[in-house]
Amino acid sequence: MKLIIQIPCYNEADTLEIALNALPRQIEGIDKIEYLIINDGSKDNTVEVAKNWGINYIVNFKRNKGLAKGFMAGLDACLRNGADIIVNTDADNQYCADDIEKLVRPIVEGKTDIVIGERPIDQTEHFSPLKKKLQHLGSWVVRVASKSSIPDAPSGFRAYSRDAAMQMNVSNEYTYTLETIVQAGRNKIAMESVPIRTNEELRPSRLFSSMFGYVKKSMLTILRAFMMYKPMRFFTIVAAIPFLIGLALGIRFLIYFCLGAGSGHVQSLILSSTLMMLGFMTFIIGLQADIIAANRKLLEDVRYKVSKMYYGQSEEEKEDRE
C-alpha cells in the first residue's frame, strides 16, 4: 500500500523544510511513503528547498491559482503516481505530523474513505474568540448541508482513499475543505473524524486578508455548495418565506373582507398575490435546479468511471491480481 503526502505551497521557503522534516518515514500497514508539493506560483525558493530535501514529486503552477486548484492538481498527480492513500497537510507545519498515522489508520483498516483531522479549536491560542465561533458555525452549516458529523469542516489535515480521491471535484476557487465534505456527504462516501494536535503558529494565515474576507468567502462557498448539491431543499426554504408571508396577508384580507371592510385593504391583497407568486416561482426554480443537480450526479458518475480507467490500478490492486 502506497501513501503520498501532498503539501500545497505558496512562498513557503521559510517553513517548508520544518514541515517536511516532521513527516513520517514509515507507518505500520503502509509499504511505501512518498512526498509531493504543489508549487502554487511561488516567487521565492520554495521549489529549491523541496528539491534539496529530496521531495519525490513537484506540481508546478506558473502563477498563483489558489488553494482549491492546487489541491485538485495534487490529487491528480498522486493518483497518476499510484497512491492508495493521499494525505493533505500544510507547509507551515500547522498540524502535528505524527498524527498522520491516526489519519490513515481507519483507511488502512478499510473502515472509511475520508478522514478529517479535528483540531482543538477552543484550545488554540492564536485563534481569536470570533474566529473560534465562526469555525464552529461554519462546521455546523456544513454538517447540515452534508448530513455528516464532521466537527471541524475547515481543517485541511485530511486523508483520502484512492477511490474517494477519484470522486472529488472542486468547482470553487477559494478552498476545497468545505465543498468536498458537502460533495462526499451527497455521494454517501464514508467519512469520519479523528482528534489531532496542532503546532505553534510559524506565520499568519494567507488564506484570507481579514476576518470579514474569511467570513464572506466561507459563507459564499457553503451557500454555493448547498445550492449545487441540495438545490431542492435550499430553494424550498427560500420560497417558503415570501409564500408564507403572502399567505398570511391573504388570510388577513379575507378576514377583513368577511367583516365587510375588504375595500380598504386591497393593497394587502395585491402584496399577498405578489409574494405568493414570487414564492411559487422560486419553488419552480428549485425544481429546475434539482433536475440540473441530477444531471450533475450522472456526469460525476461518468467522470468517476473515466478516472478509474485513466488512472489505472494502484499498486495494491496490482499485487492483489498477481
Image (cartoon, rainbow, N blue to C red):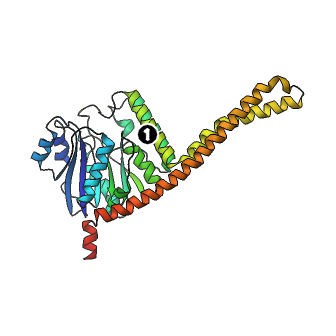
Q: Secondary structure at mark 1?
A: helix
**Residue type of the residue flagged with mark 1:** Thr
Query: Which x, y percent locates residue 320?
Result: 28, 74
In the displayed structure, 204 sits above or below 71; it is above
- Residue in front for this viewpoint, 78 or 127: 78
Residue nearest the viewer, comparing 138 with 243: 243
**Is 54 situated left or right of 293 in this image?**
left
Decide: is 237 above or below 131: below
Q: Position of residue 234 (x, y in %)?
A: 56, 43
**Occupied quadrant, residue 126:** top left
Across and down, in percent, residue 264 comes to 83, 22
Where's residue 195, x and y in %?
36, 48
Q: Quadrant of the N terminus?
A: bottom left
Q: Is residue 35 above or below residue 173?
A: below
Where, by quadrant of the figure, is residue 48 drawn? top left
Regarding residue 189, the answer to whether it shows in the image is no
